[in-house]
Image (cartoon, grey):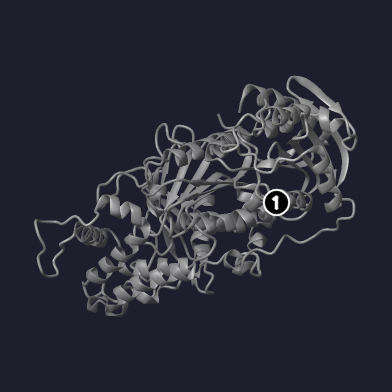
């Protein structure tokens, strides 16, 4: 354990918990502040002598910091195996990779399931509402505490991509390059609508108890599972669902009842059931809220280009997928248009795929090649081997 | 691209390299795999951007460290702010776009100067080919049959000159291009050039133009620039 300026680092340099004391509070966009908080993080690889090879990876809504190592609850391998790892575009042999759980999360970073130091009980709904900006502010404190002044790259997909755009808006001088995949600069009405369905499902579960379920030893599993099922549909494309399941039945013949007759029903039920083992319902409320509140242009007089005025020197790579209807290409193009208007160094590629929003997590060779090409060229410009 | 076009493109590049001011901001529309942008960056230290329709082209540009946006000249030029560049380059592409008139206008909204190269449909080989065979001409520069050619808006030098006049564009310099031969400065208004020049390259400006706003976009995706 080491301690400097109210920051306590627990466990080794490859990860653990970074604790920020009352002298290093997290100021939140809502006006509230977290006077004590912890960030769970992982690192892979080694920071080089001139501290120029650090890459921050930002995770999506239900992701975490276990980007390239097994998940402690499910035992599944890291969530981005095609992008991060030996021989991959982001490689611990060349990069010092940092990944942290977002503020409001449930994988070790302070969130609604953490103990409120004032009451000694889990925060529940007493946890302040957080934003994408708050997540990034916390990450910036972590990165600084790890001794990194400027990041070679910030990389993320979906909600992770929103954090990338926020980094470019808030800390442009601290990033050399930025990769934003399958994301958007604001949540659309449809995005908000789907999230509201999920939140209502959770809050309608009698075990939710106004958010105080943890003190009562309960978990609103049914509501959280339904939220996940609805959201999961938005991560896939119609074509992918059709290809995978069509109208295939679970057993011979219909049940003439409401069991999971269709394979797609069984699949969704499984997705919901597996999710509740690894995710907290209140975290789901808080993080979806943060995404809904995200409107980068709104914070710059309605002009998105305003967010990127100071980021002209940053190399941007924006990627989208043809079948992603959650954050469709038009959203990425709006980002690119704003980057152009700000005369930033923007590259953009729309990748042909029928796998929907989740394509960014999968083995998509065009995406992987594009990432490799972009990051290798940026690395050369940065003087990395 | 056939060998003839490749050789021609090389002459094209050489001429563009000559025309572009060192350190300029350049947008290459239809930049392919980024060969010209890379050449200009190396020889003229330009600050370059590209627009390219094919994903393979964009990927190749990314690994060359170039800033390239996937898009199409007909649709996506409106995304660029006015006067963001010193030069907009449109090499062997104008005849393939759906609205050449609009694209030309856009080039000179985005950039102070445009470098445009086009095949000349008035070239003697094209004329004789049509006269002799009674079929759509196929020559070294125009080597695809009518049903599969990407060249949907071919013009002669005279046509091009007329359009420039109509749009108030000034031809500051022009040269004739043929495969394997160095570019030859020419007077595009001279009758003989409309027979002789197989391809032509123009440096255009818009003397009267003030900074004009980008064209109005459809309201559906205008939420970000309101």
In the image, B153: left or right of A229? right
Crowding around mark 1 (Cα neighbors within 10 Å: few <14, some 14 to 19, many 20+) is many
Return the x and y of residue A24 as percentages of the image width and height. Answer: 52, 62
Tell me the SS state at disc 1.
loop
For label 1, the residue is: A343
Q: Residue at x 53, y 54 (%)?
A: A164
In the image, A301: left or right of B192? left
Q: Residue at x 63, y 29 (%)?
A: B143
**Would you say residue A123 is visible in this rendering?**
no
Instruction: Name the chain letter of the residue that bears numbered label 1.
Output: A
**Would you say residue B45 is visible in this rendering?**
yes
- A160 over B43 or under it: above or below: below
- A195 over A380 or under it: above or below: below
- A57 over A292 or under it: above or below: above
Which quarter of the picture shows residue B62? top right
Return the x and y of residue A198 as percentages of the image width and height. Answer: 34, 70
Return the x and y of residue A91 as percentages of the image width and height. Answer: 44, 35
Which quarter of the picture shows residue B140? top right
Q: Residue at x 33, y 67 (%)?
A: A113
Q: How many marks?
A: 1
In the image, B120: left or right of A306? right
Which quarter of the picture shows residue A287? bottom left
Q: Residue at x 86, y 56 (%)?
A: B209
Q: Residue furthest top?
A: B180
As rendered, which of A251 and B124 lies closer to the eye?
Answer: B124
As rendered, which of B37 and A368 lies closer to the eye?
Answer: B37
Return the x and y of residue A132 as percentages of the image width and height. Answer: 50, 63
| Quadrant (top left/top right/bottom left/bottom right) for the C terminus of chain A | top right
């Amino acid at each position: 354990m080491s301690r400097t300026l109210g920051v306590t680092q627990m466990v080794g340099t490859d990860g653990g918990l970074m604790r920020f004391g009352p002298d290093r509070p997290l100021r939140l966009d809502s006006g509230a502040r977290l006077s004590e908080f912890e960030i769970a993080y992982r690192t892979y690889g080694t920071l080089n002598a001139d501290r120029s090879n650090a890459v921050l990876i930002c995770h999506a809504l239900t992701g975490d910091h276990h980007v390239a190592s097994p998940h402690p609850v499910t035992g599944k391998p890291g969530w981005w195996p095609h992008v991060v790892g030996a021989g991959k575009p982001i490689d611990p042999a060349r990069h010092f990779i940092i990944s942290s759980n977002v503020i409001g999360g449930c994988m070790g970073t302070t969130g609604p399931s953490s103990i409120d130091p004032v009451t000694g009980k889990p925060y529940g709904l007493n946890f302040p509402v957080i934003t994408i900006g708050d997540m990034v502010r916390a990450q910036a404190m972590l990165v600084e505490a790890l001794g990194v002044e400027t990041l070679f790259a910030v990389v993320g997909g979906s909600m992770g991509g929103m954090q990338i755009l926020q980094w470019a808006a808030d800390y442009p001088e601290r990033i050399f390059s930025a990769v934003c995949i399958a994301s958007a600069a604001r949540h659309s009405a449809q995005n908000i609508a789907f999230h509201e369905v999920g939140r209502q499902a959770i809050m309608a579960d009698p075990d939710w108890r106004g958010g105080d379920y943890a003190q009562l030893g309960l978990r609103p599993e049914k509501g959280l599972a339904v939220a996940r099922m609805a959201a999961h549909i938005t991560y896939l494309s119609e074509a992918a669902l059709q290809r995978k399941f069509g109208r295939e039945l679970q057993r011979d013949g219909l049940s003439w009842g409401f069991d999971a007759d269709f394979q797609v029903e069984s699949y969704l039920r499984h997705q919901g059931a597996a999710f509740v083992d690894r995710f907290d319902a209140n975290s789901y409320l808080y993080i979806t809220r943060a995404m809904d509140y995200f409107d980068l242009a709104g914070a710059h007089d309605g002009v998105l280009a305003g967010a990127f005025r100071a980021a002209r020197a940053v190399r941007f790579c924006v990627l989208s997928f043809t079948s992603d209807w959650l954050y469709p290409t038009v959203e990425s193009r709006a980002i690119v248009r704003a980057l152009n208007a700000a005369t930033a160094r923007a590259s953009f590629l729309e990748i042909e795929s029928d796998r929907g929003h989740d394509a960014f997590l999968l083995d998509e060779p065009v995406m992987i090649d594009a990432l490799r090409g972009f990051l290798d060229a940026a690395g050369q410009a940065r003087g990395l081997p | 691209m056939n060998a003839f076009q490749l050789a021609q493109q090389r002459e094209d590049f050489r001429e563009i390299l000559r025309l572009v001011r060192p350190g300029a901001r350049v947008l290459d529309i239809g930049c392919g795999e980024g060969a010209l942008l890379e050449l200009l960056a190396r020889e003229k230290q330009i600050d370059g951007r590209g627009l390219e329709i094919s994903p393979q082209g964009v990927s190749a540009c990314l690994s060359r460290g170039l800033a390239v946006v996937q898009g199409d000249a007909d649709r996506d030029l409106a995304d660029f702010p006015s006067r963001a560049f010193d030069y907009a380059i449109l090499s062997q592409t104008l005849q393939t776009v759906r609205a050449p008139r609009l694209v030309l206008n856009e080039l000179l909204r985005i950039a102070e100067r445009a470098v445009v190269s086009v095949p000349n449909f008035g070239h003697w080989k094209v004329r004789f080919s049509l006269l002799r065979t009674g079929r759509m001409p196929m020559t070294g520069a125009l080597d695809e049959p009518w049903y599969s050619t990407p060249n949907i808006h071919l013009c002669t030098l005279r046509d091009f000159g007329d359009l420039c006049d109509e749009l108030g564009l000034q031809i500051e310099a022009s040269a004739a291009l043929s495969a394997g031969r160095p570019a030859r400065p020419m007077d595009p208004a001279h009758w003989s050039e409309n027979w002789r020049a197989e391809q032509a390259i123009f440096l255009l400006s818009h003397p009267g133009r003030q900074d004009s706003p980008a064209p109005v976009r459809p309201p559906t995706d205008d939420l970000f620039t309101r």
